[in-house]
Amino acid sequence: MSTTSTTSATHPKWQELTERALEASTLGSCASVLHWDQETKMPPEGIEPRGRQMALIARLTHELGTSQEVGDLLAACEADDDLVGDPYSDTAVTLERLRHDYDRATCIPSSLVSEEAMLASSAQHNWAEARRNDDFSQFQPYLEQVVALLRRKAECYGWAQGGEPWDALAEDYEPGCTAAWVESVFTPLRERLQNLLDRLMGSSTPPSNAFNELCLPIDKQRAFVTDVAKSIGFDFQRGRIDVSTHPFCTGFHPKDVRITTRFHENNVNDALGSTMHECGHAIYEQGLRQDCARLPLGQAVSLGIHESQSRLWENQVGRSEQFWKWCFPKLSKYFGSDVASLDIDGIYRGANIVRPDFIRVEADEATYNMHIMIRFEIERALLKGDLEAADVPAAWAEKYREYLSIDVPCDSKGCLQDIHWSMVSMGYFPTYTLGNLYSAQFFDAAKREMPGLEDGFAKGEFEPLKTWLNEKIHQQGRRHQPAELCEVVTGSPLSADHLMTYLETKLGGIYGL
Amino acid sequence: MSTTSTTSATHPKWQELTERALEASTLGSCASVLHWDQETKMPPEGIEPRGRQMALIARLTHELGTSQEVGDLLAACEADDDLVGDPYSDTAVTLERLRHDYDRATCIPSSLVSEEAMLASSAQHNWAEARRNDDFSQFQPYLEQVVALLRRKAECYGWAQGGEPWDALAEDYEPGCTAAWVESVFTPLRERLQNLLDRLMGSSTPPSNAFNELCLPIDKQRAFVTDVAKSIGFDFQRGRIDVSTHPFCTGFHPKDVRITTRFHENNVNDALGSTMHECGHAIYEQGLRQDCARLPLGQAVSLGIHESQSRLWENQVGRSEQFWKWCFPKLSKYFGSDVASLDIDGIYRGANIVRPDFIRVEADEATYNMHIMIRFEIERALLKGDLEAADVPAAWAEKYREYLSIDVPCDSKGCLQDIHWSMVSMGYFPTYTLGNLYSAQFFDAAKREMPGLEDGFAKGEFEPLKTWLNEKIHQQGRRHQPAELCEVVTGSPLSADHLMTYLETKLGGIYGL
């Protein structure tokens, strides 16, 4: 590490501690390889034996991370002033994060880790089946088990000492985040968003959807998005792109970061958006410090900050007019006469259409956040015991009517659409909207510090933005808590203003408000 | 398991023992997934972090398999007459194999396992570099370390109690196999083979090489070999085919078995042969018992028997006249006018050309075994201390002159061509020739038991052979030692006669001897 305290490099207890921590996170990274394989390459019948591999690695990783030996090493290092004398040194910060992780992990018995992995496997399987059959009642007993297990887990984490169960679980995804804080951020956001949506839906000059409905061959789409990925900075020497139903990014190490995307003949914009989104995640992972890879200062700080990186490249860059000035000739190069009817302005407007609909992953930049708020409120109520699993479909329908003025037609387009709860994950959803908020705030800071940044996009100059993000965010690892990182990078705490001003300006212009 | 002793299913110590054994082999199967990924998908820079993942899993797998707990459970089960009363029961046989594995694994300290994994990583890297530079001297220090480490490992296994160091290492690949026994099998084989080669090389009517030099598009080759793989019985619901420099097969579980193949525009026969070869391995892995997957009765018995399965499909089936009667119309279907100049007889003869050359993996059925004998003799001498690493190139050249009458032109086409030694593997090579011998002997037994078997190939009937192999070999797992399995299946001990008679008959016919 670059700014270690003088003695840490040769301090035997410290060496041993980081060695043990590396083992646990390296084993965790093996699970990530298996998960990537499962989603992209595994033959259909491989699922059952794969479940057993994953459960075993989860348990062994937990055992490595919670051993008495690690506890003793932590205590010995914490007592050594050579290591912790300067609280801002890499060593002291790393130690603080390792202590946090150890204390969290030791709250949970190994048996619960195995139980969770087994439940995740069966719940996901049954969720997929229920969704295929469009029948929530098939998934309901599993959701009940998920809620029960997560309430037990939240108890292990000691939520009763303050806050509510949701907070204890969210800590795994967004350190320092509480439901009350999320609510305080989301409430003003929702009001201003609803106002904007009302005005957009009343516009008499909405954009045309022609760009999104063009039929383009998939092999050419693949070449096109690969070219864009390379141009914005995804390093293929340290990564690859594959195809999966739901696009995702996974990093085993800064030297091996994989993304997936998806292709539909009649939706090149989805392939492009998915690719740029996942590239944003990947540029974060590839931008992490290699000298402390798989250790806290070489790890991403939170899912919210991670999502800010994907959203920034997908939206602030990929849906900007300047981006399309650069990208339009590329579109012509790959698709020739198939895109002859389009022009830059039409594409830019088409890429920014706003339309309240049922499916979160297909939602536009504005309505997306409403989908998140609904999920947050429902999972929070489930964990509190204010809502029963059986009542989720009704609560879901009610909130979609209230927030988006649409009637959910069926479970598969309603409360069965997301995989998260079946993965035994609650506390995760808000990080998507936090990501949107962070991305707008980071981008405002970047523009302030680099005048003319957006004009560069029109010339294909994406390196300045990438370098800025590398330095300000990626290379920081877990040095700061996410909310603190936002203040350090932008000079002010997270606020919905940046996202809302960005949306009001851009969409207001496009919709002629 | 199907024929467990009465009480084993509910015997708590036995349940615990198999649970522990399953964990070790499941973790080992995770390493196989990582290795598959490394060879087929991993981006270039991923190699270094992957090395650390592999070394960690190797060490943890070893620790799981050698714990005191497993030792105590083994002892408790062995002392229980309910479990071992019937020595032929699945339970007793499983216990015997678990004891064997435990005793072997506990000979080796964990530190040696880590050291071996680290050496394998650096030695492979430097071997690849040396081969690229065609310079043995760059690899020599690593080969010296490999030999030194393997001699220490053989000492840990206690070779000095009988036999020689090579025997102790070969046990990992071919249980029960000794260098003296290999020599006793290889010596008569070499004499008869040399005689055959002399006569073939003197033939005035050798086959034409036209089939092997045809230029055919790779996407069509891919469709063609996929079709053949499906036809001979590879199950794509439980497996997949990818591309790698050196084709291989790896099974994580009977439900997830992967093979790779390779394509060259001007060598469809190589793609077909590689695919059928790996399919043979895969049909073995997919044919293992699922009710005791990853436990001894659901594991392959040895590399020699494994190789017999691949060779049988590649050679006895894939290079037969009857096979080509069925396959020729397929060739026309996929390649159309590009193969119009060919006929069945020409292809059959072309697929069986014999030509002494330098490269083992490109060798024909007859000369292949000479390559193996040379490697066996050299590695045996290295381990005994009769040959220094520095003298390997000279020994290599001398043996190629003696056995194949050719002059090795350079290291990269000589002693640097194989990856095995750099993987810290010695004792492995002879299993290739043992596989050839077993395959011929098994095939003779199959023909004896199923008259008209080969005529079925001409009609695309491969199921009878597959079913026979499933029952006689695959479903036996590790019930018998490999040499014993040969006797059980064929009625007689392994002999070179079957392979030699097969080669003399087929090649004699083709070469007009």
Image (spheres, coloured by chain):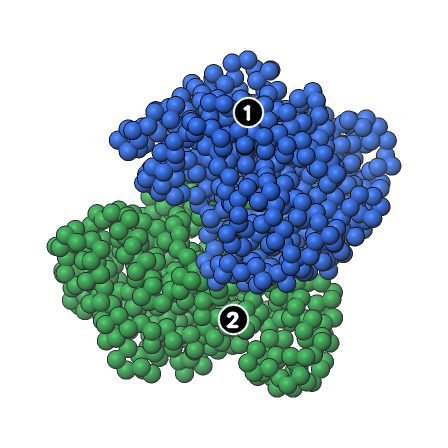
Chain colours: A blue, B green
Residue closer to the observer: A359 or B73: A359
Read off the chain for label 1.
Answer: A
Q: Give residue A504's mark.
A: 1
Foreground pick, A206 / B297: A206
Q: Amino acid at mark 1?
A: Glu
Seen at 84% across and 37% down, the residue is: A78
In the visual, does A60 lie left or right of A5?
left
Query: SS at mark 1?
Result: helix
Relative to residue B277, is residue B510 drawn left or right?
Answer: left
Q: Quadrant of the C terminus of chain B?
A: bottom left
Which quarter of the figure is the N terminus of chain B placed in? Answer: bottom right
B362 sits to left or right of A93? left
Side of B337 relative to A373 (left or right): left
Whether marks 2 and 1 lie on the same chain: no
The extreme top residue here reads A451
Which of the pair B282/A474 is nearer the observer?
A474
Which residue is the extreme one toward the left? B341
* SS category of the residue bearing label 2: loop
Evaluate whether residue A274 shows in this view.
yes
Which residue is the site of mark 2?
B290
Against A320, residue B311 (above or below) is: below
Horizontal and vertical percent position of residue B75: 72, 74
